[in-house]
Image: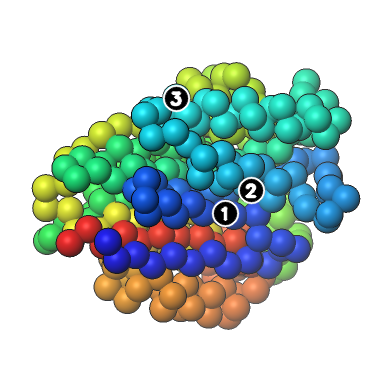
Amino acid sequence: MKLECISMKGSGKSNEDAYVIQQVKHVYAVIDGITSLIPYESAAGQTGGAIAAELVKKQLEAMPEDVALHDYLGTVNEALQEQMRHSGIDLEKKEALWGAACAVVHVGDTHIEYAQLGDCMIFAVYDDDMVRPLTHTQVSHLEQAALAKWEQGINEGLCTRTELHERCMDILIHNRYQANGPGGYGVMNGDAACRDFIEYGRMNRVGVKALVLVTDGLFMPRALGGAQPRWEETVLPIVHKGLQRYTDELIALENNDPECIRYIRFKKSDDKTGIILYLQ
């Protein structure tokens, strides 16, 4: 099976994304680490988000072949809880927890199994270029309020990312507390309630020419005053141009808008990780 993978650091200090390519087991995943609101850095200089992403990666690479993906993500979440406890993290404080979003697939001869948490996405692309999202961005309903407030700030004359971020900080902090809670979103952060938010399924491979797995840093951003881009605007360029060219063009767009005022987003450049699997 031909594949392409990319993982690039954004404008932050380190790349908190990770990925899994297990061609013998036919298991592939993208992972987006989430740093705690209370700053944490290991002796080696790793943030909590980077540690979480690396732990999820290693756990998925060691996944037994006879286990269900969604069950195993729950097991990985328990391992993350143990790692945080070992590191002295107060597990009662949501603002102290490390976290990770994840999208993972197991590609069989006739079927594809998948599981997901957070805002990592999986897409099946058919022979006729129809794009089928297998997952849902679990945080999108919460992010919309912050993005709307960001855009309102631009329209009122704010012109730096720092000012805009400060304006939206209350919503961003509020959203973090909704992890694995009623009306919130799923994320691996050691909370046992994570299991209730794992999305998973099984589909047949008939007519599927490619699978695309991406962290949210590869989503095409929304232009100021414009409509939310359709998934096809992210996925089809990846399939037709390849991940590297798509990513290069997205980074060029971001570099031309460092203050995030032409394209609505919270960071100049988020970490970017993607895998495209060509099934035919």
Question: Mark 2 packing: few (<14 Cα in 10 Å), some, or many (20+)?
Answer: many
| Residue drawn at the location 77% of the way across and 41% of the way down | 37
Q: Is residue 72 above or below residue 36?
A: above
Q: Is residue 96 above or below residue 161?
A: above
Residue 18 shows which numbered tag?
1
For the residue marked with disc 3, what is the amino acid? Asp
For the residue marked with disc 1, what is the amino acid? Ala
Say which label, 1 or 2, has the lower sequence index. 1
CB within 8 Å, label 3 to label 1? no
Model colouring: rainbow
Measure the C-alpha gap from mark 3 to mark 1.
20 Å
Q: In this view, does 100 lie to the left or right of 91?
A: left
| Residue drawn at the location 69% of the way across and 50% of the way down | 50
Question: Mark 1 packing: few (<14 Cα in 10 Å), some, or many (20+)?
Answer: many
Say which label, 3 or 2, has the lower sequence index. 2
Residue matched to label 3: 71
| Residue drawn at the location 24% of the way across and 43% of the way down | 108
Residue matched to label 2: 54
Q: Is residue 160 above or below residue 126?
A: below
Between 69 and 240, the residue placed more toward the observer is 69
Whole-percent x, y for residue 222 in the image: 46, 61
Whole-percent x, y for residue 273 in the image: 51, 60
Mark 2 element type = helix
